[in-house]
Image (tube, rainbow, N blue to C red):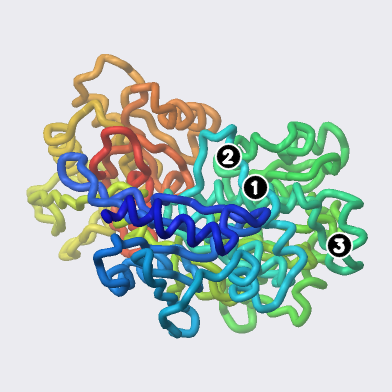
Amino acid sequence: MNEAETRAELIDPKLKACGWGVVENSKILREYNITAGRIQTGGRRSKRLTADYVLVYNGIKLAVVEAKKNELEVGEGVAQAKLYAEKLKLDTTYSTNGKEIYSICMKTGAEDLVSDFLSPIELWNKTFSVQNEWREKFASIPFEDKSGTWQLRYYQEIAVKNTLEAIANNKTRILLTLATGTGKTAIAFQIAWKLFQTRWNLSAIENGKNNHQLRRPQILFLADRNILADQAFNSFSAFPEDAMVRIKPSEIRRKGSVPTNGSIFFTIFQSFMASSGSDTKNSPSAEKIFHIKDERQGRDKTTINYPEPKETALKVAETVKAYFGEYPTDYFDFIIIDECHRGGANDEGNWRGILEYFSPAVQLGLTATPKRRDNVDTYKYFGAPVYTYSLKEGINDGFLTPFKVKRIKTTIDDYIYTSDDDIIEGEIEEGKIYIEPDFNKIIEIKAREAKRVRIYMDEANQNEKTIIFCATQDHAAAVRELVNQYKKSNDPNYCVRVTANDGKIGEQFLREFQDNEKLIPTILTTSQKLSTGVDARNIRNIVLMRPVNQIIEFKQIVGRGTRLFDGKQKTL
C-alpha cells in the first residue's frame, strides 16, 4: 500500500475504533498545515510543515499522528512526529505505519510501541492531570473566525491557549513575547473573546462558580499611542457594538464622568493620566508624580521608592484627579497592556501607577522584545512569558517576510572642521571629530543628507512604500523635502512626514499609507513615532538615516516591513 491507502484502510479505522471523530467533542484534523514555508528568492516558498493527523478534543489540540506507508518501518516517522509535536507544543505524538503504533511523550521522554491510540478522554486526562473547570469553559468557545475567513496560525493558537491556561490557574500577571508582525492584537482579541463569551470575571473566581453568570467581564486595552488603541478598537469589531468603548478625555469632559456602560474599553495611558480641565498634552507625567528633585544630594531626579505601590497609586489618582482614579480599583477584571516594555511595567515607567492602581485585575503584557538588560523590569513585573515566538521563527515559518540589510556609505561619515568650510549657522568646535550620532542633532551638513537621499532614490523602486527613520522631527522634515525634490511622481503628497508634531494631518497621512489599495503617500519620514506597533503590510523598504544602536529597536523597526503582502519577497 502507498501512504494514502495505508491511511484510508488501516490508520483511519484504528483512530475511529479508539473514539476519534466518534466521541462527542473529538475531532481529527487531516493534512494540518503548521507553517507556511519560508519565502525564498523569486517568491517561491520552502516546503510547509504538514501534520498527517492532529487529534483535537474539547477544542484543544492534544496529539499529532505521523503516518507512513505500511511497507516502511514504524520508526521512519518518529523524527517528524517529534518535530511537529515540538512546534505545536503538544505532550503526545505518534508514528504509525498502520500495522504498528509508536507512542512518544514529549514531556517525560517516554516512548514505546503501543497497541492502540489513547482515546479522547484518556489523552485529555494524560495531558491535564489536574482538571480545571475554566479550562473546559474556555475551550468550549470556538475561536472567532470572521465567518470562516480567518484561520489562526499555530503559534497564535498556542499563545491564546497558554494565556487562558494561566488565567484558569489564577495567575494574575501574564506576559506574551511575540515578534513584531505576528499578530499580538489578534491574539489579544481571541483571549478577550473567550473571556467575554464564558462570562469569566474576578468575582466568579473569588466567590465560586455559581456567580460567574451574573455579568460579562470588564476588559481594558491599554496602549501608549492613539493609533495603537484605534487599531485594536477596529480589530475587535466582532464584539457587539454596544460592548466596546473608546475612552477619550474630550468625551469625559463633555459628559462629566468616565464611561462605564460597556465591556471592552480602549484607551491610552496619557488619556488616563489626564484630569478634569486638562488635555493629554498637559496631563501630569510620571516624572511629576513619581520623581522629585533632591537638592541636598545634587541630583536632578530621585526615584521615590514607596513601600506600598498600590497605596501610592491611590494617592496619585486622588492628588492629580486623574481620570483612571474615577474608576474603582477593582473595576476591570482583565487588562491588556500593548507594547508593555515601553513604560507601563517598568519600575520607573511613565505609567506604572495605573497598573498598580488596578492591581486586582489580571494583567496581560504584550511585547515584541525578549528579555534584556534594558527591559528587565517588564519581565520582573509580569514574570516569565507563557509563550515566546521570535522574529527568526516567524521568518523561517513563512509568516514574516525575510529582510536584507544594505549599507550605504558616503564620503562624510565623520567630520572635522577645517578653515575653508563655511559655517552657515551656530558654532563649531575646532578639532572635534563629529561622528554618526552627532549628525542632524549637533551638526547638520545638508549636502550629506542630499547625497544620501539621492543614492536611495536612484537605487530604489520609487513606487514601493517606504518608511525613512530620521534623527529628529526637523531632520524628518528636511528629508521629506529632499525626497520630494528628487521624486519622479507628480503628486505633492508622494512623501510626507508623520511625527508627533504633525498631529491629525499626520495621522490621516498614516491611515492612507496603511491602505494597501492606495499608492499615495508612498514614502513616510518619521523619527520615533512609527518604530513600533504600526500595521502596514505593504512596506517594501525601511531606510535608517539615524543610528540604531540597540538590537531591540532594530528588530522593532525592521518589523514594520516584515508583514506579509501579495508579491512581497523581502524587505530592504
Snapshot quadrant of residue 287: bottom right
- Which numbered mark, 2 or 3, is in the foreground of this view? 2
Front in this rendered view, residue 219 or 238: 238
- Tell me the tag on residue 204: 3
Front in this rendered view, residue 267 or 100: 100
- Tell me the tag on residue 142: 1
Q: Amino acid at mark 3?
A: Ala
- Mark 3–mark 1 Cα distance, whole angstroms, equals 21 Å
Q: Quadrant of the C terminus?
A: top left
Is disc 1 placed on a helix, strand or loop? loop
Front in this rendered view, residue 348 or 339: 339
Do tag 1 and tag 2 residues touch (Cβ < 8 Å)?
Answer: yes
Is residue 172 shown above or below 105?
above
Is residue 223 shown above or below 243?
below
Q: Amino acid at mark 2?
A: Asp
- Tell me the tag on residue 145: 2
Relative image position of residue 427 (x, y in whole percent) = 27, 53
Q: Is residue 458 left or right of residue 199?
A: left
